[in-house]
Amino acid sequence: MPFGVDRSIAFGHDTKRMASASSRPTPIAWLLAPALLLFVLFFVLPFGVMAAMSFFSSNPVTNPNAFLTTRHYERFIFDSAGIFHDALWATLRMGLITTVVSLLIGYPLAHWMARMQSRLGHALVLMAVIAPMLTGIVVRTFAWMTILQDKGVINTLLIQWGVIEKPLPLMYNEFGTIVALVHIYVPFMVLTLTGVIGRIDERLEQAARSLGAGRLRAFVEVTLPLSLPGILAGSLLVFALSISAYVTPSLMGGTDVLTLPMLIAQQVGTSFNPNFAGALGVILLLVSLAIVIAYNRILTRLSGEQGMA
Amino acid sequence: MISRRKALRAGAGLAAVGALGAPAIAHAETATLKITTWGGKWGDIMKATVLPAFEKEFKCTVSADQAFPFMPKLQTSSKTDPLYDVFHTNSNEQWSALTEGLVMPKITAKEVPNVADVYPYAVSDKIVGVTIFTSAIGLGYRTDKGLTKPTSWKDLADPKLAGARGGYLIPVNSLGQAHLMMLGKIYGKGLTDLDAAYKALEQLKPIKLVDFTGQMEKMLLSGEVSEGVIHDSGVYRYDGQNQAVDFASPSEGVLSLEQVLNVTPGSKLRELAFGYIDYMLRPDVQKMLAEAVWYSPANKKVKLDAKYDAKLLTTEAKVATLIQPDWKWYNERKDDIDARVTKILKS
Amino acid sequence: MSALPNKQPFDAGRAAYLALNVALLFFLLAPIVIVLVFALNPTPYISFPPVGVSLRWFDKFFGSAEFMNALWLSLWVAGCVLVLSILIGGASALALARGNLPGRAFLTAFFMSPLMLPAILTGLALFQSYLLIGIGRPVWGLIMAHTLVAVPYVIRTTLAVLHNFDRRIEEAAAVLGASPVRVFFEVTLPLIRPGVFAGGVFAFIVSFDQFPVSLFLVVPKGETLPVVLFNYMKFDLDGAIAAASMVSILLALSVVLVLERLIGLKAYVKL
């Protein structure tokens, strides 16, 4: 792709500095300062406190008897209870499935929205896409209960129409959880994608069509590759969100689903062990960061552009 | 004639004196008692009636935290400056709080006079603090499914109920935890017989598990389950709404779900905190709250209206059917139990 | 294969495309329709099928001082978070895409971290820290906490748009004599609007609907709507929740519409 290569033409005297010292940060890099400040104060420091807590037996500030220990980490690593490793895999697996399904559902919607001509239609679809994000955690669960449970809308209709005899187990398991998670995260995928797809010049597709490509081929060979940054950004976003979700899986999954975030929430809210919860959080964060960085690196290599997604 | 400037200066002087004096007066009048409270109807009545009356009588303000969970917040605050003065929660959490030194082990009639009038269960050795209300955990069931009214906890294991019975996610719900202990009692040697309990739990599969009682209520109301573990308040609150649900107290006894108040040792308003607990034990306050949310009052002297009196635990005999689990024992093993039941109930 | 659009197959393909999208929309909207049904159903518990239409739950919602205060607080906090995160997030995206920073992949992943942590931990960690330094639980502390979890969205979406960016437009403007500052404000910013808009929408919604982070950082009488609703729900199961939900949806959608007019998702320059 020729875009963005010939920067030497513009920007006057700045360009010389850019062209010759391309490994040095440009003045624009200073724009990162506010975010860094925000993150250091409100994320790194508090999380540092929490990570420190994970090496203590209890809260050292309020309990003079607290001592340093690695037992929280040992508890996870050796997993004598047999549930922690499973929880980590379940978390990653569900995150992956949720991401893929959200992409499959989100892309057509994003494409439709981005290409829509009517301003009104666009606004309506936008509202329809955003509305799921706004329903609120518990109400949404009750809505799904009404739809998915044994006496819910789907099962009642299917039994009435004679399609099935016994109700399908659509809830209190991984299926129900994924349905609910996808429902929450598709809007994120759509909104991320639609901006990118909207920026793709439609005439590129038209050019391909006029050269003889069918609509599908024009899409696959022109639009799809150009929308890759959006796909990658959206996937990463949904993946990150779904591996940290705990309220929805708790309410939708019964015991069939036990993810690491659910465990963390249990440790904080009912076992009152914030130290172990902190250790689990550190582990989850490290695993996630590793995945995200690897993802970014692979993509950088694949796409040839720097800092992709 | 006093010049305007002089009058202004005098006025400013008076105002300054007033301003200096005011904080001292204000400080003496408006202590803020920090408590925790449930939401829903309980919260409504507290905020509308009970708390304003308390504030007026005791000349203070009450700051009521409704954002559950409370224990992690109390844990995080320092012991000398605790986040709450009065800590209202269920029995199991009071025990957890005690192990961390966050609440007082015992409250007697010396600190709270009305304690002299409560049933024995309210200040038994299974209680940390003072119980102000309790509910009975038993079996809720639908009356239109051709089921006979359950008479035993074992009825939940009836094969006909496969896929139509309800329970709780044990790690997060105390009714589920209490039920687990009950399984040990009816199928084994007692409330602490975990082996028997685990075996019995296995037999209850398939069972639909929920996080909190509100969900269980919904499952019963919509017919998603025909029978489930629930407390009486959760069923009786639909009284008069023509719902085909009812509550059964199994013959082996019902488990108690206590509402327990306690005071934090580091509280700077101990006298006021005790006064609050005393206030909550007054018969008129107890009656108001009990009838609003169908809780059984801990004060023996409370006279409820007939329809409440019939169903709630308001006599020595009825109260004797309450079984109080040993939460201290359970909390010590909670992590192991959580892991074990998670594995058992995964289908 | 031919360049002439053949009417028959054209419609079939397009029809399938539309049908698919309508079906997907249906999936997205079904639970909301259910919530609306709950909100209008007069029975004091959630049931299906509905027995009638009544506005009593909306009455209850609007008549409750607690709900109303929580609603205004949530809106106010979300508004602040929107502004803050657009500014901070937009700036960061520009810095990451164009600043030639070392360790860009790591930095981008770092800024995603708040999303990967269960929000309950973030809330607890912040609560602990606030208590440690003794500031208690001020509203600005809540706003900053929300901003922390909202900024990653803006960074994400703006970065995605920046990558498909045709820099020759900027270069053309510069060649025509515009200063870098002018190019930035009159060319670059308008062109990244869709990304900033999408991120802004997320930021507003994520804050408005935020539950776990708020859980530890709100004070009595200063609770946000999701916290109030969740605790109401644990003890009372009636249509007031659904009414609250519908009102939230309508309010938030209005904000999104206003944002769309102002910043615009479709407002991009066509050459």
Image: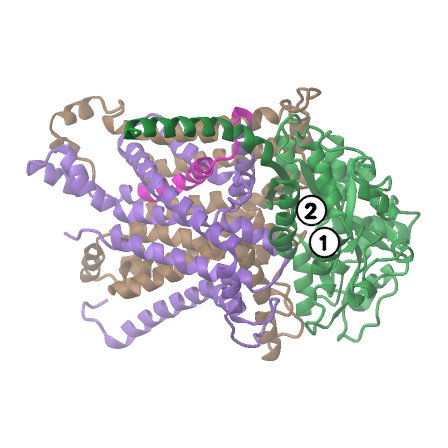
Task: Name chain B's colour.
Answer: green
Q: Position of residue A257 (x, y in %)?
A: 63, 50
Say the numbered circle drawn on residue B168.
1
Kindly identify the residue that appears in the image at 46 percent across and 30 percent down: B18
Task: Name chain C's colour.
Answer: purple
Q: Position of residue C66 (x, y in %)?
A: 52, 52
Q: Amino acid at mark 2?
A: Val
Residue furthest to the bottom: A161
Residues in magenta, as a range: C132-158
Say the numbered circle drawn on residue B47.
none
Mark 1 touching mark 2, by CB under 8 A?
yes
Q: Is residue A199 left or right of residue A292?
A: left
Secondary structure at numbered mark 2: loop
Kindly identify which chain the residue marked by label 1 belongs to.
B
Q: CA distance from mark 1 to mark 2?
A: 8 Å
**Circle 2 is placed at which residue position?**
B172
Residues packed near mark 2 inside 10 Å, few (<14), some (14 to 19) or many (20 plus): many
Magenta stretch, main secondary structure class: helix
Kindly identify the residue that appears in the image at 64 percent across and 28 percent down: A73
Kindly identify which chain the residue marked by label 2 belongs to.
B
Q: Which chain is brown?
A: A
Q: Position of residue A251 (x, y in %)?
A: 61, 54
Residue A37 position (above or below residue B117): above
Q: Is residue A304 left or right of residue B149?
A: left
Image quarter hosting the N terminus of chain C:
bottom left
Residue A145 in sight here? yes
In depth, the one of C132 and B213 nearer the eye is C132
Q: Is residue C115 magenta?
A: no
Kindly identify the residue that appears in the image at 53 percent across and 57 percent down: A180
Q: How is the image coloured?
A: by chain
Q: Is residue B274 left or right of residue C61?
A: right
Secondary structure at numbered mark 1: strand
